[in-house]
Amino acid sequence: MTVKRKILDLCGGTGSWSKPYKDAGYDVRLITLPEYNVRTYEPPENVYGILAAPPCTEFSPMNYGKDKRQIFMDIDKYKNEPSLEILNACLNIIKKCNPVFYATENPCGLMRKYMGKPQLTFHPYQYGDGWTKKTDIWGKFIIPKQTHTWETCPKLNLYVRPGRKKPSITFFHKSAKLLIPQFKDFDIKTDSELRAITPPGFARAFFEANP
């Protein structure tokens, strides 16, 4: 009997990052609220891979300001900040499991001051999804080869802010799902769920590089 490889999708939301693994028959565990809380989750044995996408509230460039920057000037003082607490819970699970590969994702922002230089920084369009969202990935994994430039990426009829040349998912309303064929398989209920979704092109490329 073949044992399915276990993949943990921490704070995975819609499960978009782990979907290629699930579709390929892996034993994918979606560890996300409200059913699971990474702060208290006890992982199983023999975990093969971990994908982690902790919330970016305290790390987001949208919230830059004196108080947010101070978080990273005194980590002990701010150790109970929600995003730091959840990030640390994800990192503890990774350490406990010691999987073959692991990756932690966050929009490009203040997490760099806590995690250091990421192994990969990308925009969704570089993997075939026609929008921007500069994203950092840290961990131990094979970097998926980029497949597109903006010129070669298939274009969609998406909102572009005045003065910008490319659409940014950071400013999309949940109704944009109707304009994005790649999102048809996901149950997206809120603007934040749509904005947080792992671009399917990247998810597929990551799976192919880290099977």
Image (cartoon, rainbow, N blue to C red):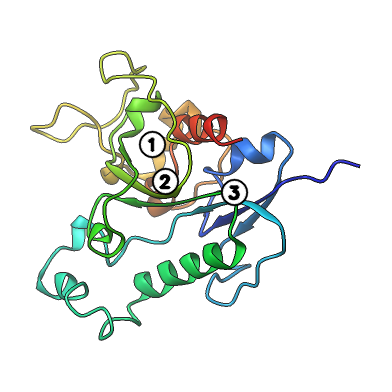
- Of tags 3 and 2, the one toward the viewer is 3
Q: Which residue is mark 2?
A: 194
* Amino acid tagged 3: Val
Look at 39% across and 20% down and name the residue there: 147
Inter-mark Cα distance, 2 to 1: 8 Å
Viewer-nearest residue: 15 or 167: 15
Location of residue 42 by image quarter: bottom right
Look at 34% across and 19% down and name the residue there: 148
The local crowd at label 1, few if under 14, some if 14 to 19, many if 20 or more residues have their Cα within 10 Å, is some
Image x and y of residue 138, in percent: 38, 51
Q: Which residue is mark 1?
A: 176
Given contact means CB atoms under 8 Å apart, are the residues at marks 3 and 2 in contact?
A: no
Q: Is any atom of residue 128 visible in this view?
A: yes
The local crowd at label 2, few if under 14, some if 14 to 19, many if 20 or more residues have their Cα within 10 Å, is many
* Amino acid tagged 2: Leu
Residue sitting at the far right: 1
Given contact means CB atoms under 8 Å apart, are the residues at marks 2 and 1 in contact?
A: yes
Q: How many marks?
A: 3
The quadrant the N terminus occupies is: top right
- Of tags 3 and 1, the one toward the viewer is 3
Q: Secondary structure at mark 3?
A: loop
For marks 2 and 1, the one nearer the N-term is: 1
Q: Which residue is mark 3?
A: 100
